């Protein structure tokens, strides 16, 4: 039986993506070869990576706006460091907004490299909200922000006003909602939440931003070098790039980012209404900052956990345990998850209330 997959990442992919990816591993485009045993310089693969790079820009309405898209390796965690290599100057300061474990990691990694300042933080209340009215110093090399906090279930609905370059980790909500993406100078996202599978990061960078960089950067860390080499400076993760290519095509065929936003809103409304209605659960993220991608919730009486877990298991609900640092539950409701899976989870929560409430 196919499970209802609420995993936070690697996470659910559309069925057709899984089928096409599986087929490509066995016999790619009827070539008699596997996708993962041909050269990345083979014209068929070059076409794939370039159309995926194009599709990413198109979906975010950044085509012909002076941006480049890259598929790099090392996870979002490597981008924490690559960003500093490229954008943090020897005497400069980078600003960080600390809204969860990942943004905390990003600023820690940057602090090994240069001077950083924490511009705002919600750590004092266990990352349950998004700081408001943020005053951004004007002398920063860049401001780093995490648009969606995968572990705590909060999400920026509005971004701080600033003239300094804006760098955004969109790992867990890229392609999930319509934004004016031209506000950002650099966007990165590991693929395994909403844009494919692990092994590849999508990086979208404003070309202009890189022109000011005067220092020498090791090639593998240099966005400029990766752009110059059309995302083929070294061997890309061919399978992961292919899965992203399929996922982005699926997104486009499903109506693009606006259609995803409508679907994600409907799913989020459904699960949050139940969290608020149900007497056995509560949500701790501040209501106006709730994520439309990761809904976190807790049992009022932890001793009932085993009963709830058993009910979920029986219904084929997978992956709703909270992150090990946050506890409780987390339903990740990424683009590929259908509303029927959320309806089922809601029914299980209601059934649980009838039995134990
Ligand atoms: C998952 C996640 C990361 C970490 O990605 P890796 O690919 O494991 O390095 C970073 N930031 C956010 C917001 C995430 O959700």
Image (tube, helix red, strand yellow):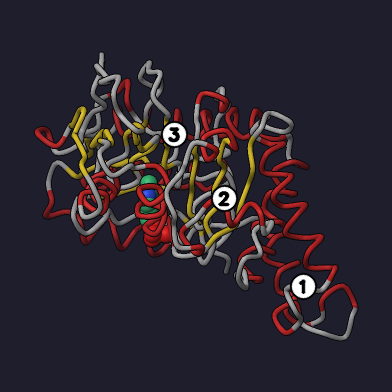
Spatial separation of the CA atoms under disc 2 and disc 3: 33 Å
Residue 292: assigned label: 3
User: Reading the chain from its start, which is encountered first: label 2 or label 1?
Assistant: 1
- Is there a contact, CB below 8 Å, between mark 3 and mark 1? no
Is label 2 or label 1 in front?
A: 2
Instruction: Say whether mark 3 is within 8 Å of ligand 1.
Output: no
Q: Is residue 173 left or right of residue 261?
A: left
Quarter of the rendering occupied by the N terminus: bottom right
Q: Secondary structure at mark 3?
A: loop
User: Which quarter of the picture shows residue 259?
Assistant: top right
* Most foreground residue, 314 or 26: 26
Count all numbered tags in the image, as a single digit: 3
Quarter of the rendering occupied by the C terminus: top left
User: Which quarter of the picture shows residue 125?
Assistant: top left
User: Reading the chain from its start, which is encountered first: label 3 or label 1?
Assistant: 1
The residue that mark 2 highlights is 224
Locate residue 356, reporting x and y percent.
Answer: 21, 47
Q: Count residues near mark 1 (Cα–Cα under 10 Å), then give few for <14, some for 14-19, many for 20+.
A: few
Instruction: Say whether mark 1 is within 8 Å of ligand 1.
Output: no
The residue that mark 1 highlights is 41
Asked if residue 319 shows in the view, the reply is no
Q: Is residue 203 left or right of residue 218?
A: right
Q: Residue at horizontal 9%, vertical 33%?
A: 124
Spatial separation of the CA atoms under disc 3 and disc 1: 39 Å
Spatial separation of the CA atoms under disc 2 and disc 1: 20 Å
């Amino acid at each position: 039986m196919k499970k209802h997959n609420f995993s936070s990442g690697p996470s659910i992919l559309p069925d057709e993506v899984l089928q096409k990816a599986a087929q490509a591993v066995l016999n790619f485009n009827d070539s008699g070869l596997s996708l993962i045993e041909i050269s990345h310089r083979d014209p068929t693969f070059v076409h794939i990576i370039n159309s995926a790079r194009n599709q990413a820009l198109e979906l975010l309405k950044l085509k012909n706006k002076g941006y480049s898209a890259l598929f790099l390796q090392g996870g979002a965690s490597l981008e924490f460091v690559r960003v500093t290599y490229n954008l943090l100057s020897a005497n400069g300061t980078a600003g960080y907004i600390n809204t969860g474990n990942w943004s905390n990691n990003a600023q820690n990694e940057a602090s090994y490299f240069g001077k950083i300042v924490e511009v705002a933080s919600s750590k004092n209340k266990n990352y349950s909200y998004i700081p408001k009215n943020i005053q951004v110093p004007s002398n920063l090399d860049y401001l780093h922000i995490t648009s969606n906090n995968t572990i705590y279930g909060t999400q920026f609905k509005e971004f701080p006003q600033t003239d300094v370059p804006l760098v955004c980790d969109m790992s867990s909500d890229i392609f999930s909602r319509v934004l004016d993406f031209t506000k950002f100078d650099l966007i990165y996202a590991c693929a395994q939440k909403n844009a494919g599978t692990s092994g590849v990061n999508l990086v979208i960078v404003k070309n202009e931003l890189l022109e000011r960089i005067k220092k020498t950067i090791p090639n593998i860390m240099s966005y400029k070098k990766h752009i110059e080499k059309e995302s083929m400076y070294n061997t890309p993760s061919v399978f992961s790039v292919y899965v992203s290519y399929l996922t982005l095509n699926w997104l486009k065929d499903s109506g693009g980012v606006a259609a995803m936003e409508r679907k994600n809103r409907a799913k989020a409304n459904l699960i949050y209404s139940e969290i608020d209605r149900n007497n056995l659960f509560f949500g701790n993220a501040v209501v106006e900052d709730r994520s439309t991608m990761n809904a976190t919730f807790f049992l009022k009486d932890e001793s009932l956990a085993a009963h709830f877990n058993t009910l979920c298991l029986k219904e084929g609900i997978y992956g709703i345990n909270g992150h090990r640092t946050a506890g409780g539950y987390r339903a990740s409701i990424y683009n590929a998850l259908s509303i029927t899976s959320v309806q089922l989870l809601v029914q299980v929560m209601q059934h649980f209330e009838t039995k134990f409430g």
